[in-house]
Amino acid sequence: MSLRNKLYVLCFSLLVGLMTSCLGGDNFEDNFIPTDAEIVAFSLSHDSVSELKTVVFSIDQKQNLIYNYDSMTYLTDIKEKVIINYTTAAGVNNILNITNGDSVWVNSGDSIDISVPLKLKVFALDGNTTKEYSAQLNIHQIDPDSVQYQKFASDLPFLQTEETKTILFGGRFFTFSKIENDLQLYSSSDAINWQKETLSGLPATILIKGIQQNKDQIFAYSQEGNLYTSQDANADTWRQVNTEYPVVGILGFLNASANQLEGLSVVVEKEGEKVFAFTHNSTDWTYSSSAIPTDFPLHDFSSLSYTVMKTERITNIGGVSSDGTVQNAVWSTQTGLYWAKISDNRQIFPPLAGANAFYYNDEFWLTNGQLSDGTYNKEVYYSTDGGNTWFIKPEKYQTPEDFTARSSASLVVDGEGKYFYIIGGKNSTVLPEIWKAFQNKKEFNY
């Protein structure tokens, strides 16, 4: 035993002897010596790693573990020894570092190597009772901002067609598809196990890619211009909505706010002109006074309903205008009736048809889509200001090499905003598959 160790043992013996002499007598309570060998507080610090001072360590007395539940930032590099600070139930420096078979006494305030998990042996004041802990500093080993993509399912028969649309409605996935002019509906609670539903009230002429929804209703329109809605939990029972003019495009649903009525925004053919129309109750309609702009997208756009400073908006991105031109502008409305272009064709992303815009991690993300020249986009773009300005995500956000670029896919974000699913789509052929993705930090415990 080293001289230092002998001195510690001697100190313990003297302390025990003094307590016995001072207390005196034969009574058990008078001669009781504390046997608590627990660590009750633990922290680390380092002058060059300021974040370390803020790390909170949990002490699991049952499992004898000391660890930081919230891991330190990815790529945190601690090359040198750190300062250990602790408090024990005994209130003295009474910890022996037995890591790697060593036996070195450690005072609170000493420097210590934490490159490997520590094994700490604590002595109670009786000099005999001990307790051993494993102490570890957790640092994230993967980049929290990078995105993981995984092919979740493949060869799904109801996706083996160009006309499909998947939505998340009432916590369930619903996929509408048209196979050989037969309109079909499939549902799933987990995007793995699917079952066929029986549809009623929808004609085979429904334009599946034009289906839109809010939290309570789903909307669709037909080639004839008829509008339909479903409020059924299984999305399988539909009714026709009375409209004065034929509907030629559903633009999105505007949610209610303190100063706004909720309602559906569409484009109708009125007296030979395409105009905006809005209804808050599927009965009463209002119309714009002039025709829609010639470059306004009528189909193959991506629609988002969201809130900005307590104001509800619908924003549509990309798509194809009535003259067949693929667009890359961003249009937005606060009324459902009057639309404004909030960005123009100088956007960083190219004109895209059948792209997917979605709200994720407090940003707009945009991916997939077919370009004007017939090629397919594989970049992921993002906007932090509601679609006004856009940037390309770094490589760690992009889809993997084995992901086939596509258009006309459905992209669904789960109810917790944790995972997003890319369902179906087409390239040179249809892609009857589902990809599941998430940003790594969504899996971390913060």
Image (cartoon, rainbow, N blue to C red):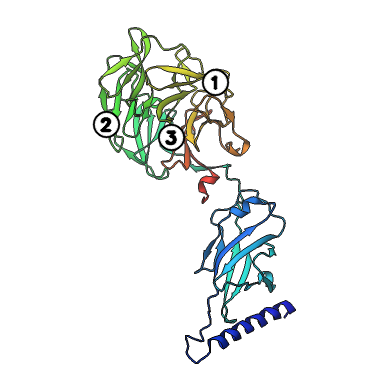
Point out the tag, 3 or 2, that comes first from the N-terminus: 3
Crowd band around label 1 with a 10 angstrom C-alpha radius: few (<14), some (14–19), many (20+): many
- Check disc 3 and give the amino acid type: Leu
In the rendered image, which quarter is residue 205 located in? top left
Residue at 47%, 39% in the rendered image? 420
- The CA span between labels 1 and 2 is 37 Å
**210 displayed left or right of 362:** left
Q: Is residue 73 positioned above or below 430 on the image?
A: below
| Residue behind mark 1 | 351
The label on residue 159 is 3
Q: Is residue 62 positioned above or below 125 on the image?
A: above
- Check disc 1 and give the amino acid type: Pro
- Check disc 2 and give the amino acid type: Ser
Point out the tag, 3 or 1, that comes first from the N-terminus: 3
The residue most toward the bottom is 26
Q: How many marks?
A: 3
**100 displayed left or right of 185:** right
| Residue behind mark 2 | 200
Relative depth, front residue between 174 and 279:
279
Point out the tag, 1 or 2, that comes first from the N-terminus: 2
Residue at 37%, 13% in the rendered image? 275
Q: Secondary structure at mark 2?
A: loop
In the rendered image, which quarter is residue 135 located in? bottom right
In the rendered image, which quarter is residue 333 located in? top left
